[in-house]
């Protein structure tokens, strides 16, 4: 395989903890803080790492971790996911761009799911783990890390906020959600969110969600035997009558008529 996942795990510390690699790491290290805080010493600097901070280190770099700070309630807490890996693909990926050693990306649920899937596969043990699955998952994680870094280091705050709104809609379009939830996710008021999204993408947030829902409905109509009522429900439409109306307005044919045409072709 072009990648090798050596260690993938989760750690949590509620008592003082120290870890040192003063002689230098022998492999790549990815570490995502998901809870609490800690101190790390990297490249001659001390960093106060909090939830949502991602550390990326290459072989040969010094690394030290220290958990000792208490929060305002007097509790000590530090939780993180971490990976040690190597491989020619990882070498090539690392050389593509210069990434900060500490990246503020937030606790991204999609990234966590990739990480958790890797962890589960690794825990199957050498008799059951699938090296090919881990290879693809690790590559996917690396590529998603780059996307997360790029999206969270936008120099223009309004561009970043608009992108946050867009990502929220893409993730939640096929379920019922409120525009206020998207606004909160982007850290904006509802009125500001509505204006900003229209300015950047030329359509309303509801319009964008509807486009995603319709595309999802088309896929289900083409490739599944689900009823049209079930398709409407699972694609985020509040009722079949609303789905019917929106679909006809967009495609000039009813959902049932579209499905008949597809099956007849």
Image (cartoon, rainbow, N blue to C red):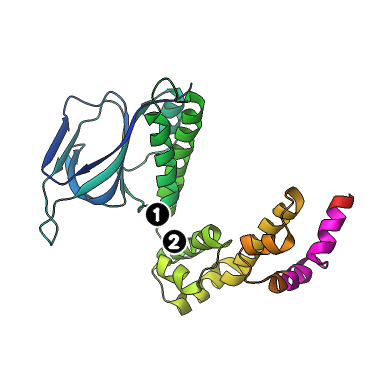
Around disc 2, counting alpha carbons within 10 Å, would you say few (fewer than 14), some (14 to 19), or many (20 or more)? some
- Horizontal relation, residue 136 to residue 67: left or right: right
| Residue 47 visible, this orientation | no
Query: In this view of the protein, can residue 94 be seen by the observer?
Result: yes
Magenta-span inclusion, residue 249: yes
Please give left or right for residue 20 compared with residue 118 in the image. left
Residue bounds of the magenta highlight: 244-262
Q: Measured along the vertical axis of the image, is residue 183 above or below residue 139?
A: below
Residue 199: image quadrant is bottom right
What is the distance, in whole Å, between disc 2 and disc 1 at their CAs?
7 Å
Whole-percent x, y for residue 13 in the image: 18, 43
- Tag 1 residue: 152
> Which residue sits at x=70%, y=53%?
220
Image x and y of residue 239, in percent: 66, 71
In the rendered structure, find residue 160 and report the number of the disc placed on it. Answer: 2
- Whether pointer 2 and pointer 1 mark residues with C-beta atoms closer than 8 Å, the reply is yes
Residue occupying the point 81% across, 63% down: 256
Give the percent coordinates (x, y) of residue 171: 52, 57
> SS of the residue at dot 2?
helix
> Is 209 covered by the magenta stretch?
no
Q: Which mark is residue 195?
A: none
Q: Of helix, strand and loop, which mostly describes the magenta segment?
A: helix
Could you tell me which residue is drawn at 42 percent across and 29 percent down? 90
Q: Is residue 141 left or right of residue 209?
A: left
Query: Residue 174, image x and y in percent?
Result: 58, 61
Please, is residue 215 above or below residue 46 in the view? below
Query: Residue at 66% of width from left, 56% of height from top?
Result: 216
């Amino acid at each position: 395989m072009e990648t090798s996942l050596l260690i993938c795990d989760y750690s949590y510390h509620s008592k003082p903890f120290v870890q040192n690699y003063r002689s230098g790491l022998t492999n790549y290290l990815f570490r995502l803080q998901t809870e609490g805080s800690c101190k790390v010493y990297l490249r001659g600097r001390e960093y106060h790492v909090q939830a949502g901070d991602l550390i990326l280190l290459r072989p040969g770099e010094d690394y030290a971790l220290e958990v000792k700070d208490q929060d305002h309630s007097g509790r000590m807490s530090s939780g993180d996911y971490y990976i040690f890996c190597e491989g020619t693909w990882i070498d090539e990926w690392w050389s593509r761009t210069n990434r900060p050693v500490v990246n503020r990306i937030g606790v991204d649920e999609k990234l966590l799911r990739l990480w958790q899937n890797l962890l589960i596969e690794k825990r199957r043990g050498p008799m059951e783990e699938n090296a090919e699955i881990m290879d693809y998952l690790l590559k996917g994680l690396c590529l998603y890390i780059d996307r997360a870094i790029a999206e969270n280091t936008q120099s223009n705050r309004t561009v970043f906020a608009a992108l946050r709104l867009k990502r929220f809609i893409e993730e939640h379009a096929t379920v019922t959600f409120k525009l206020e939830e998207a606004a909160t996710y982007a850290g904006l008021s509802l009125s500001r969110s509505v204006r900003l999204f229209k300015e950047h993408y030329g359509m309303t947030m509801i319009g964008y969600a509807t486009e995603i829902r319709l595309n999802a409905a088309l896929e289900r109509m083409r490739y599944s035997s689900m009823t049209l009522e079930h398709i409407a429900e699972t694609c985020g439409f509040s009722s079949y009558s609303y789905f019917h109306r929106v679909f006809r307005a967009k495609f000039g044919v009813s959902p049932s008529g579209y499905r008949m045409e597809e099956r007849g072709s």
